[in-house]
Amino acid sequence: MWITVKAKDKAKKNPTWLLGILLAAHLVAISFNRVPNNPELWVFQKLFITLTTPGQSILTGAVNWVKGGINHYLSLKDARSDNEVLREQLNDRRIEILSLKEKLIELELGKDLNKWKSAYSYDGIDARVVGRDVNEMFGTIVIDKGSTSGISRNQPVIAGGGLVGRVIFTAPFASRVLLITDERHASGAVLVQTEGGRLIGLLKGTDNFHCNMQFIDPPGKVLNGEQVITSGQDGIYPAGLLLGRIRLTNPAGSVAPQVVIIEPAAPLDRLEKVTVLNIPPEKIRNISRELTNEEQMQESASDRNRRENRR
Amino acid sequence: MENTSRGTNLFIFGCLFAGVFLKTTLEQLVPVTPGIWLRHIDWLLLITVYIGLLRDPVRSLITGTVAGILYDSFSGGQAMGVNGLCYILAAFLTHRITALIVVDNLLIRFLAVSLASVTCSLTRLLFYRMLNIDLPVLADGGEAAQMVVFGLFANLIVSVVLYLFLDRIFKKDVGLRMRRSEARRRRL
């Protein structure tokens, strides 16, 4: 026994000293969170995530199986399966339209289309969602594929045609994904207007199954249901991944307010399967650098034009 | 005696694991609206408080430690040790309540759960702030208060049903607890 009988009796009579020891041990553990140059102190997480993922996977599978069976018999059998197929097709068409739009813009900007690649055309690793974060303040999920399957940190994760988030932690047989609705998540976003314009902004999670789009530039008119995609300038996500759609209280549309609510395109509340896009982080960083350089060049060109106009 | 104690320890460990699985696996399968409410239930805290109510301080403090390790391991937040500290404080607080108040009824359970829930939430928020974890809930006092209150009510409501269930599992310990409180009452 790891606590002797004598010590146990002493602790039962006066548990304050045991409390003191445990508090001190925890404070030491907490102080390790702030150790500089060593952010990878998630030893327990790696161990637990590896040990528990098979159990969670079996349990999730069993619950999904029972849930699916009940739903199948309760609802119209054929209508349900048809609906699933149609939904998948719809997602594919949406992605296709989005990719074509992006291609068209690249073409309008006079870029070399041979170099251009759709964000959805990268290889994907399919994974099953086995768990959520135990802490209600953090929006993360656990998937049943890890570093042995080729998953590495910061890889984008998609589901149902929309962005789910990015991998923040990998163990050999499981990984943790930070959802786009987590309050710690932020990414560059582009609002694709129905009229054809594009507004740049920042997408932030709100931890309430929704996201906010902030700092919209230039302030233009936005309509309900307009799509928001990744800008690719954050160096994490490739450009063109569908983030979500605008949800306005005024259906007629309005001039973009300071904060716009975005409904994620991926079904984050009922995630079962996801796809991890196998994009090397260096590649995204290079694309991001190119985009930033282009933007700087465009800015300097417009400055020059303005100066010339003044003259 | 030794076997009974080992059996109880195994039961506690099983309950803690069940609590974690309930939180991480089952909640995601529930539709959105009830799912948002379910998120505020702290199953591990409720189990820790229940063990504290069994009037064995050593076991309740150890349960708090194990619950904290489990919580931190299943959480994506970079704050190892914070939740263990919260649960230990909750366990100690429950021990103090059971040491001061001899009777055991629903009101005492409510009092223990309320104090433990509020202490746990506030300690957690305080340490997250100290560790500079970027959470908007820490910047907004209203949101933080809302989280504490939601957590308190969710835990109180669930504790009624959960403790009835746990009473059935820990039958022997409930008898022991009753005998202990009776003996203490007579001594007084």
Image (cartoon, coloured by chain):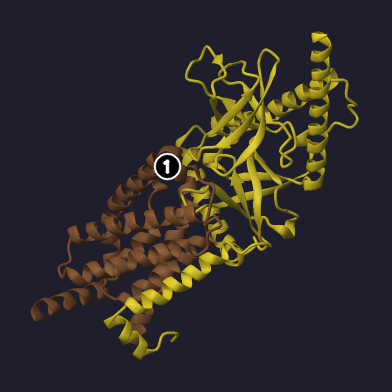
Tell me if residue B11 can be seen: no
Report the number of discs: 1
Residue shown at 15% from the left, 68% from the top: B103
Give the quadrant of the N terminus of chain A.
Answer: bottom left
Residue placed most toward the observer, B71 or A92: B71
Q: What percent of the width, then of the height, locates residue A85?
A: 64, 32
User: Picture quarter containing residue A197?
Assistant: top right
Q: Residue furthest bottom?
A: A6
Tell me the amino acid under the disc marked 1: Ile
Q: Mark 1 points at which residue?
A: B36
Label 1: chain letter: B
Please give the letter of the chain rendered in yellow: A
* Secondary element at tag 1: helix
Residue shown at 32% from the left, 46% from the top: B149
Q: What percent of the width, then of the height, locates residue A71?
A: 48, 40
Left or right, B137 with respect to A231, comes to left
Left or right, B119 with respect to A101, comes to left
Please give the letter of the chain rendered in brown: B
Q: What percent of the width, then of the height, locates residue A24?
A: 45, 73
